[in-house]
Every structure is written in C-alpha cells, then in structure tokens.
Amino acid sequence: MFTNMSVRSLLRLSGCIFREANAVSSALSAEPLTCSTALLSGPNLRCGSFALQPQVRHYARAAKKSVAGMFLHLSDLTPTMLKLDYATVPLAQTYKEKLELKKELLISKVQRDKNDRNSEEVRVAMLTARICNFQDHLQIHPKDKANKRRMLMAIDKRKKILKKLRLIRYDAFEKVCEQLGITYTFPPEYYRRVTRRWLAKKAFCLKVFKEVQKQKAEEKNKMKQNKVTKDANIAKAQ
C-alpha cells in the first residue's frame, strides 16, 4: 500500500515539475515587456517575473473608392489652359485654381461683353460651376450632408434666376440652357402634400361629383321627354 502511494506522489511531483519547466522555457523565449508597453497592451499573462504579450488583432480597414473611373467636371480642361511653366507637371495647379478656370470658361460662353460680371447669364454660369464642383465632391464623399445641402440651395437659386430670365429675355434663356447644358423643368402649377386623409376626401368628392352629374343628366332627359310629349299633344290637338 505504501509503495502505491509513494509511486502516485512521485508521478504527481514529476508532472508538476514538467509543467513548470515548460512555462519557464516559454517565458524565457518570449521578450519581456517594459512598464510602458505593459500598460498600453492591456491584460498580460504573467509567469514568474516574465510577462507574456497578448495576441495582436489586425482589423480590416475600409476600402477607399477609386477616383479613376468617376467623371469629374474639371477633367475636361485642356493643358493649354494651365500654366505654361507647369503644364507638363501633373498636379501642378491647385484645385481652387482649376475651379476658377472652369468658372471663367463657363462665363465666357454666355456673357454679353468682356466687362459683364453681374448679369443673369453670368450668375447662372457661376452657380453652374459651383454645382458641378459639389457634384464631383459628393461622388467621392457621398455622406457629406452639409455640402449636399449647399448644392441644393445653389440649384434652387439657379432655378429662380432662370425663371426670371425666361420671362424677361427668352432668347438669352434658350442660349444659356444650350451653352451650359441645363435642362429646365417647369414647376407644377399646384402642389400639395399627399396624405391618407386628403386622398380619402378627394375620392369622396369625386364620387359625389359623379352622382350629381348623373342626377343632372337624368333630369335633362326627363325634361326633353316631357317637352317632346307636350309638342306631340299640341300637334294632335290642332
């Protein structure tokens, strides 16, 4: 009995010693952490006086949109319009300077003379250049709500100017729409927000109108028949 107990105790001691030896060897192979890295790396596994590094997690990054396949309104500027000293160098000019060139190009198509900077045609051209700039920006950053709001405000302002220009000078209005590639859509004469209550009321009014028209038609037919019978009776009496 004593021999069995002694054998069991020896096996347990040998197993514990083997586990401690493995832990110490793995701790020696790992690089010890300093105080700063231990604080920044979060919870550490310690074995004696050595600290084991936690597992590093590599998260996936969001994929960026490629601008190569997008149509940008500033890409149609010819190299002759750029600065002569930097025409051959790519990205030599800033985006702001390219936008000014695009604005001047659109203004030159519709202005009345060289000194015209405040007419309706020129204001429409300047707003068109600004709207195109916002469209290019929103293609790359579709979640930019502030610039989307500014673009819609510029579109509404351009609509008002075009409406006024159409009433005053129709030939200039047609020229501006043709040169700048603007499609003018006429606003609806009457607009009302569609609700369930309004739809139910409209359906009821149409039903009542049809019933009234039907009753009027029946009354007209009765009056015609009465007139015909009266004429027939008068003819018989004569």
Image (cartoon, rainbow, N blue to C red):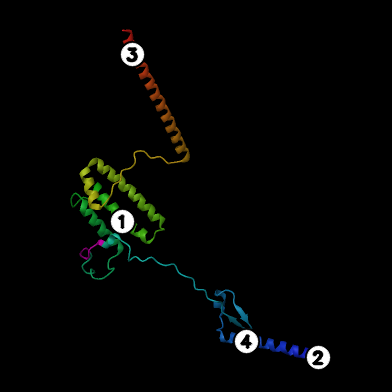
Mark found first going from the N terminus, 2 or 4: 2
Q: Amino acid at mark 2?
A: Phe
Image height of 234 relative to 146, above or below: above
Q: Residues within 10 Å of mark 3 (few under 14, many from 20)?
A: few
Name the front one of labels 2 and 4. Answer: 2
Mark found first going from the N terminus, 3 or 2: 2
Image height of 115 relative to 14, above or below: above
From mark 2 to mark 4, how far is it between C-alphas? 31 Å
What residue did someone put label 3 on?
232
What residue did someone put label 1 on?
132
**Please, what secondary structure does the residue beneath circle 1 have?**
helix
Residue 227 location in percent, x, y? 35, 16
What residue did someone put label 2 on?
2
Q: Residue furthest bottom?
A: 3
Q: Amino acid at mark 1?
A: Cys
Q: Quadrant of the C terminus?
A: top left
| Prevailing secondary structure class for the magenta stretch in the rendered image | helix
Mark found first going from the N terminus, 4 or 3: 4
Question: Is residue 128 within the magenta segment?
Answer: no
Residue 108 location in percent, x, y? 21, 54
The residue located at (32%, 57%) in the rendering is 133
Q: Left of 54 or right of it: where is 1?
A: right
Where are the magenta residues, as a range?
A: 76-81
The residue located at (58%, 80%) in the rendering is 52
